[in-house]
Image (tube, rainbow, N blue to C red):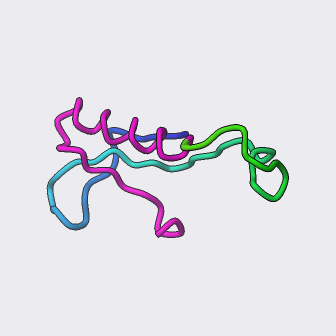
Amino acid sequence: MIIETQMHGSRLNIGKRLVYVDGIATAPTNRIEIQRPPQFKGVGQALLNFARIRSVELGYEGRVGLPKTWV
């Protein structure tokens, strides 16, 4: 996961900072099409939760931004 903590601001709350997640990846061999059942579950959720916790630690009130292509 690649996160940026200094360069991004919220578009909804102007003037408020956020943690921006620029990229996230998990093992492609863990996909259900390849491995049934997947060996790992909740990895993406755990990584995004880390970003939220880091946002709270930095005083950004849990705000996390994602690339538009993810939404």
* 8 w.r.t. 11: above or below: above
**31, 68: nearer the viewer:** 31
In this rendering, position of residue 59 left or right of residue 18: left
**59, 37: nearer the viewer:** 37
**37, 23: nearer the viewer:** 37
Which residue of the protein is positioned furthest toward the right in this rendering?
Answer: 34
Q: Position of residue 44 (x, y in %)?
A: 54, 46
**Residue 61 drawn in magenta:** yes
Q: Position of residue 24 (x, y in %)?
A: 57, 47
* 9 w.r.t. 53: above or below: below
Report the span colored magenta. 43-71
- Residue placed at 32% from the left, 42% from the top? 52
Q: Main secondary structure of the magenta part?
A: helix
**Residue 44 drawn in magenta:** yes
**Which quadrant does the N terminus fall into?**
top right
Q: Position of residue 69 (x, y in %)?
A: 53, 69
Which residue of the protein is positioned furthest toward the front in this rendering?
Answer: 37
Q: Quadrant of residue 42?
A: top right
